[in-house]
Image: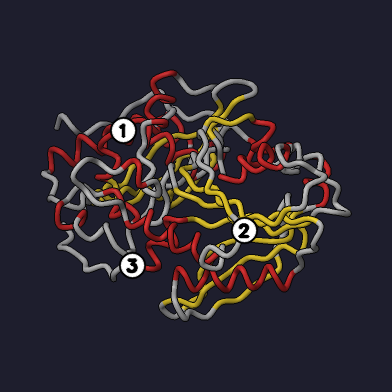
Amino acid sequence: MYLTPAALAAALAVRDLSDPATTPAGEQPHAMSRLLDALVDAATAGGAHPHRVVRSSPLVATADNYDALGFNAVAITRDRRYSHYVSPTVMLRSHTSAGIPALLRAIDGDADRDEVLVLPGIVHRRDAIDRTHVGTPHQVDVWRVSAPGRLAVDELLELVGALVDAVLPGARWRAVPAEHPYTVEGRQIDVWHAGEWLELAECGLIDPGLLARSGLDPARWSGLALGMGLDRALMLRKGIDDIRVLRSTDARIRSQMTDLSPWRPVSMMPPVTRDLSVVVAAEDDDETLGDRVRSALDARVDDLESVAVIARTAADELPPAARDRLGIVDGQVNALVRIVLRPLDRTLTDAEANALRDRVYLALHRGPRLELIGAR
């Protein structure tokens, strides 16, 4: 039910690309940190607003990740299928907003203040495997906290405009009403890119309830809250369509990950597709299955371009012969899973592809009978 020491150590060892302090000797900082610099500059009006960039441990109190921010006690995001718990009271943060409650509690409620708080870093989620999702994405929270002045929607949209322009200079954007546990007047921010609207950020005015729970009088204090996925933002800025590119060790790719200039695609290897018929629990979704595959493949997970469930059939909908062949029982489903194997830097042999296929199969399958092909 909780992360093993080995799994926790592996999670904490993932490099934070937004932090220039993690840059290997002899290399330049990653483009992610350069984009973050641009966002900080935009959020603070070129340094005109006092600000702090706060980097904290991804290990947080579960109460700060959820309760203090106002998440409902039965919110699905709390489920162990989606979050990584270390103990009953500690978890790997699922969003950088988890650092906000402690910062608010540390503020002197009687002081005058107008400060921008920037919280970047890696968050940890169980997620699907495809070209735009990863289990350790980067996020940044940008909050402006003020007293005794009152911040309102006009200031919120001004902040949004500045940040959108820092990511995609001159891009069209829209603010769509949305609900978040720790904001009022919430908005989802979409940008027009490559002929479609794409979500870039979420924002709103700081919920007075959050301020009150943090010891700040909502009659005196107000603020703005915005969260953005840095991986998505960088991919939009550079025109990248595969999230694995951001961490690639291929020299042709790595040389392009040091600035914000447009991405020049390198030669992609041909894909290898394998379809698997596996038995899984009825409640297993793409995120749960994706996390299971990541854990099983470990260092080889980047050889996978995607893992997708093509079809699901409940045990009681299968003919008797199929039920017997699979060994499936009530409460389980037969899932047809398609995996696409395509390393960024080489072509897999059939033997390598079959071996990886079998590792994925073993990670997903919960039936008593195995259909492995690696030894054939």
Kindly identify the amino acid type of the residue bearing the numbered disc 1. Asp
Q: Residue at x 32, y 66 (%)?
A: 260
Q: Is residue 67 left or right of residue 360?
A: right
Distance in Å between CA atoms under marks 3 and 2: 22 Å
Q: Quadrant of residue 351?
A: top left
Counting every numbered tag in the picture gives: 3
What numbered label is drawn on residue 277? none
Considering the numbered disc 3 on the image, is that residue within a helix, a strand or a loop? helix
Whether residue 256 is visible: yes
In this figure, which residue is indicated by the disc labeled 1? 298
Considering the numbered disc 1 on the image, is that residue within a helix, a strand or a loop? helix
**Is the C terminus in the top left, top right, bottom left or bottom right quadrant?**
top left
- Please tell me how crowded label 1 is: few (under 14), some (14-19), or many (20+) other residues with Cα within 10 Å: few
Nearer-the-camera pick, 83 or 326: 83
In this figure, which residue is indicated by the disc labeled 2? 226
Q: Nearer the viewer, mark 1 or mark 3?
A: 3
Note whether 72 is above or below 226 in the view shown.
above
Note whether 31 is above or below 368 in the view shown.
below
Task: Identify the mark nearer the N-term, 1 or 3.
Answer: 3
In this figure, which residue is indicated by the disc labeled 3? 238
Whether residue 321 is visible: no
Task: Identify the mark nearer the N-term, 2 or 1.
Answer: 2
Q: Residue at x 74, y 56 (%)?
A: 146
Nearer-the-camera pick, 164 or 299: 164
In the rendered image, the residue lying farthest to the top is 5
Residue 133: x %, y % from top left: 42, 51
**Is the N terminus in the top left, top right, bottom left or bottom right quadrant?**
top right
Nearer-the-camera pick, 92 or 77: 92
Kindly identify the amino acid type of the residue bearing the numbered disc 2. Leu
